[in-house]
Amino acid sequence: MIELVTLPQAKEHLRIDDDAGDADLTLKIQAGSAAILAYVQGSRDRIVSSDGALIEGEPLLRTQTALLMLLGWLDRNRGGEEEEKLKQGELPFSVTMLIYDLRRPTIF
């Protein structure tokens, strides 16, 4: 499973000092990473190599920042309190504004 940010990076961003929620946060890192990589679709190869290694550069930094924003949103909305603000398949605006121009839809 690809993780765009590390657990310590996520905890620093969310200002978490203890280890009680590490398993939950790790799941959110993995799921959020997958959602962001699915969103950018055809640009995934600018962020992650074919062997799953992160590719250093501006696209990675933007997707990492987007993931941190998404983790904050997920943390605030643990029970789906704001789900009516999003349509199926959408990410919060604060996330997509960072990666929108990386989005390259793949047509089958």
Image (tube, rainbow, N blue to C red):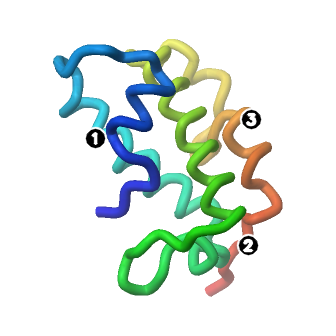
Amino acid marked by disc 2: Arg
Amino acid marked by disc 3: Phe
Front position in the image: 34 or 18: 18
Mark 1 or 2, closer to the camera: 1
Few, some or many C-alpha atoms within 10 Å of disc 2 (few <14, some 14-19, many ≥20)? few
- Under circle 2, the secondary element is loop
Tally the marks. 3
For residue 41, above or below residue 1: below
Label 1: which residue? 27
Image point (68%, 82%), residue name: 107
Give the mark nearest the N terminus, 1 or 2.
1
Amino acid marked by disc 1: Leu
Few, some or many C-alpha atoms within 10 Å of disc 3 (few <14, some 14-19, many ≥20)? few
Quadrant in the picture for the C terminus: bottom right
Q: Position of residue 19 (x, y in %)?
A: 19, 21
Q: Position of residue 4 (x, y in %)?
A: 45, 55
Label 2: which residue? 104
Front position in the image: 96 or 17: 17
